[in-house]
Image (cartoon, rainbow, N blue to C red):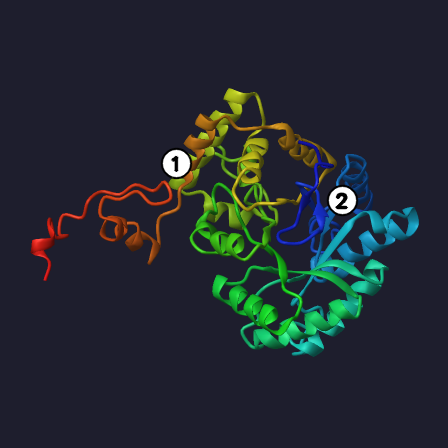
Amino acid sequence: MRLSDYRTLGRSGLRVSPLCLGAMTFGSDWGWGADLAASRAMLDCYLEAGGNFLDTANIYTKGHSEAILGDYFAERGGRDRVVLATKFCGSLHRGDPNAGGAGRKAVQQQLEQSLRRLRTDCVDLYWMHFDDPHTPIEETMRVLDDLVRAGKVRYLGVSDTPAWRVVQGQDAALFRGWSPFAALQIEYSLIERTVEHDLLPMAQAHGLGVTPWSPLRGGLLTGKYGRNRQPQGEGRHLPGVSKSLTDRNYTILEAAEAAAAELGREVAQVALAWVLARPGVVSPILGARTLAQLKGNLQALDLRLPPEVAARLDSVSAPAPIFPHGFLANTRHVMQSGATINGVASDPWPLAPASDQERW
């Protein structure tokens, strides 16, 4: 697979690369990240390899991430050749209650500010960054539809929002003839698989293309950490990584390391290849901080995990069931009572009547 083996994003006609370049690391305004030269080098590398999908947000590095992208394309051209995605909801103005969130005033103002920093007149994909519990989802979907009709936004996406709220917004849009969501952005990796309970099935049922963020779990799935390799020094991801160094996650890391050794690959490439192959996933988001990291991660495109390797990783990282899924797994024999339906077999239910004469 290559970056130029484009995929349609969900139930839309938008073509995107199978790996997206995330720009949260562009700019060091948060005290970490890539400087301007490194950011531009990563953009050059990704675009020259055929990539076309760029993801940022209004709040990333205090707005500098958007400005880096805007200046890059204003100087070098090629803006129309890429799918440029940014997000709203986060506030850049302390104390202003309408600077963030998903209300009409906030969304319109945030988009105008993003367009200015991006130095463009239209965003290809506009994400609701996270759920706003203070705003009716119908209000958000209406203002987003207005922005699409005004030609300032082409497609809509939703990120980090409960499945029921996504469905509420999607149904409101489809019922009223407004623009629906085309994509879902969620955390997803060998370590974070709880999205498989509800969010991923919801996305597939509603035609949303999935773009996982943190497919390497903040660097945890890179081979830098292990039972005998503890994190050292300071860094943005260090607190989060430290909390994730559990027995379960060590076991997953060891399985990923074993797979990498068996295949002659890097741990990060194995972890990315696993995410790339998951049902419903369109384009995982890479959050590289250096050009070397980006080049290494892009090599995951030509890695196909053998079925036995994928099965081992699936088994060791399987998430614990939650209600009602754990309960429903035990009801198949009650419904099917020994029958096979759509290829799914079941055991006979021992409490079912053995004959017509036993029924009341």
Q: Is residue 271 left or right of residue 3?
A: left
Say whether marks 2 and 1 touch (CB < 8 Å): no
Q: Is residue 80 left or right of residue 335?
A: right
Q: Quadrant of the N terminus?
A: top right
Label 1 Cα crowd, 10 Å radius (few <14 / some 14-19 / many 20+): few
Question: Identity of the amino acid at label 2?
Answer: Asn
Whether residue 16 is visible: yes
**Residue that carries the numbered disc 2 in the rendered image:** 52
Q: Picture coordinates of residue 176 (x, y %)? A: 62, 74
Between 358 and 303, the one nearer to me in the picture: 358
**Residue that carries the numbered disc 1 in the rendered image:** 315
Which quadrant holds residue 131? bottom right
Label 2 Cα crowd, 10 Å radius (few <14 / some 14-19 / many 20+): many
Q: Is residue 178 left or right of residue 243?
A: right
Q: Secondary structure at mark 2?
A: loop
Q: Picture coordinates of residue 82 (x, y %)? A: 79, 48
Which residue lies at the image location 82% right of the left edge and 39% below the top edge?
44
Q: Secondary structure at mark 1?
A: helix
Question: Identity of the amino acid at label 1?
Answer: Ser
Q: Residue furthest front?
A: 356
Between 133 and 323, the one nearer to me in the picture: 323
Q: Picture coordinates of residue 161 (x, y %)? A: 54, 62
